[in-house]
Amino acid sequence: MLNNPRSYEEACRTFRWRIPELYNLSFDVCDRQTLGGADGHRTALIVEQQDGTVERYTFHVLRLLANRLANVLTARGIRAGDRVALALPPGLAAAIALLAIPRMGALAVPVPLGLGAEPLVWRLGNSGAAALIADPAMLPALDVVRPLLPDLQTILVAAESSGPDAPALWPELETASDSFAPLVTSPDTPAFVFYPTDGAGRPAGIVQAHRAMAGGLPAVEMAMGLFPQFGDIAWTPADWMNAEALFRLVLPAWHHGVAVLATPGPFDPGRGLDMIGRHGVRALWLPPLLVAPLAEAASRPFARPRALASGPDPLSSDLHETVLRAFGIHINEAWGVTETGAVAANLAGMMELRPPSPGRAAPGLTVEAVDEHGRPVRAGERGILAVSADAPGGFLGYWGDAPGPARRIRKWLLTGRLGMRDLDNYLWPEPLAREEGVVLIAGSRVRLNEVEAVLADHPAIAAAGLIDLEGGGLRAFVVPRPGHAPDPAELRAWVRLRRSDAEAPRRIEVVDSLPLAVDGSILYDELRAQPLRIDTPTAEDRWLLRK
């Protein structure tokens, strides 16, 4: 949407929204690349497996496979407006599912692979998902909750073979037709229901329309160094099952006909640097938590990307300096909540970087700090950050009209995030306030009482109390039931299956009782005062003890 402007002011002055009256996201990011003289045989997707195997797929191939999946889902009764959940790693299955569901007029419900049975059943049940396309790794958690999901009629497993209750995806595609006409939709037709990527609580689903990706393009293109440029190949190590990865890199890249590199498996900084050079990655979006690990690994010569971007959480000045030393280029930022999409950005060379400010409002958008009644406050004053209510990236609402932090009032869409705008129109979002009983583990919110309840539900455990460790992770104190000797490894697997990977305690200590107040609540300060037992410390604990 941006036309290589020479300054931020020129970008704002010359920008015009170009979203047609009839718009289908899948047609835009895939079919359009194969029609009207476009070269559909350009590479759209590069998949490098953990064993080093590399496969490449063109836009034409993705379109045919997406058509086949749309026909498979249609034959199983999925219609426009139905919800189809996805729990897939980055790769071919995720790509064709993300293209097939919007072209049917159905709604995709992405679910991160690391979530366990309880967060999974909430997302599938709350959204009323009629179908699920899942990686085989999700089957153990799904087996726990399947009886609680009467609306879930179809499960397809992204494998070559599976059981009768969950047919394998690839054999189904082999017999399906590769002809399917994308549904003619308006830009406001619902396309996604997003939930938070962590498992805490029972959050409301955020409904985004087909236009949401296009609404965030100005900020994304700025942060990605006036993306696209000739020769760009794009990559993010983030999980594709979240809004940021999809709307800040994967779908914008396909919109511009740029190939996307997919790397299933856990993030490894060394492998990531090797892949940047091996595949010629030039445009890179990093979640804030992965910026430092990748920069710290860049101590040896390697092929450097053209553009680095991050967001939505602002980065510190120190982290900006670390990235500059490691890569020789600045890292840009794009800010916005899931309800608004990316609405602000910076771009080194076009504007001054003022970390931890993520920049200014993107061209075509107005972002202000307002009071609770939607009235703008003066520059430098604290308020609720808000974007114009008709911004194309704005959400349609919360699923089922559930309450949430964002709301529309007057001419504004209030994000629910506090912050300010200064005299130069830079935005300064404040960090989210920490809820009582909620801790951050590897960037994920964890409600301690939810993990305690899961531990106490184990047949060998009578009660449990949790605290967070200074070096990261959780420390659990468990009281066994009479005659039981709990196995820490088994308890971790129990929590992992039912909650999430981040919520599995790093240390589990068996105690005779928990310190309780007169009302029966746990005295957490007394738990924190307990010294670490060093009889069998983990490798991480040995490091902590040496400190």
Image (cartoon, grey):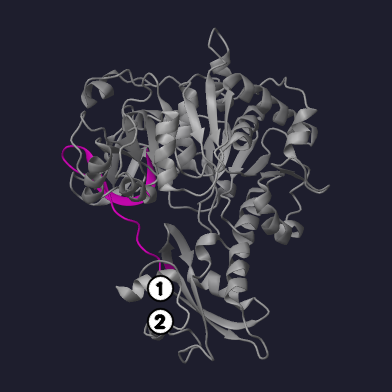
Q: Amino acid at mark 1?
A: Asp
Q: Which residue is mark 2?
A: 532
Tag in front: 2 or 1 = 1
| Quarter of the figure that contains the N terminus | top left
Residue at the (36%, 68%) spot, across then down: 471
Percent position of residue 477, x then y: 50, 81
Label drawn at residue 541: 1
Q: Which residues are magenta?
A: 410-438
Horizontal side of residue 483 vs 467, given as left or right: right
Residue at the (69%, 45%) spot, across then down: 132
Q: Amino acid at mark 2?
A: Leu
Evaluate whether residue 67 shows in this view. Answer: yes
Percent position of residue 342, x then y: 38, 37
Horizontal side of residue 233 vs 452, given as left or right: left
Element class at badge 2: loop
> Which residue in the rendered view is the most extreme toward the left?
423
Horizontal side of residue 177 vs 115, given as left or right: right
Q: Is residue 414 shown in magenta? A: yes
Say if 220 sits above or below 445 in the image: above
Q: Are marks 2 and 1 in contact (CB under 8 Å)?
A: yes
> Which residue in the rendered view is the most extreme toward the top?
37
Q: Which callout, 2 or 1, points at the residue further toward the start of the chain?
A: 2
Residue at the (47%, 40%) spot, across then down: 245
Say if 22 sits above or below 492 in the image: above
Percent position of residue 528, x then y: 38, 81
How crowded is the residue under tag 2: few (<14 C-alpha within 10 Å), some, or many (20+)? some
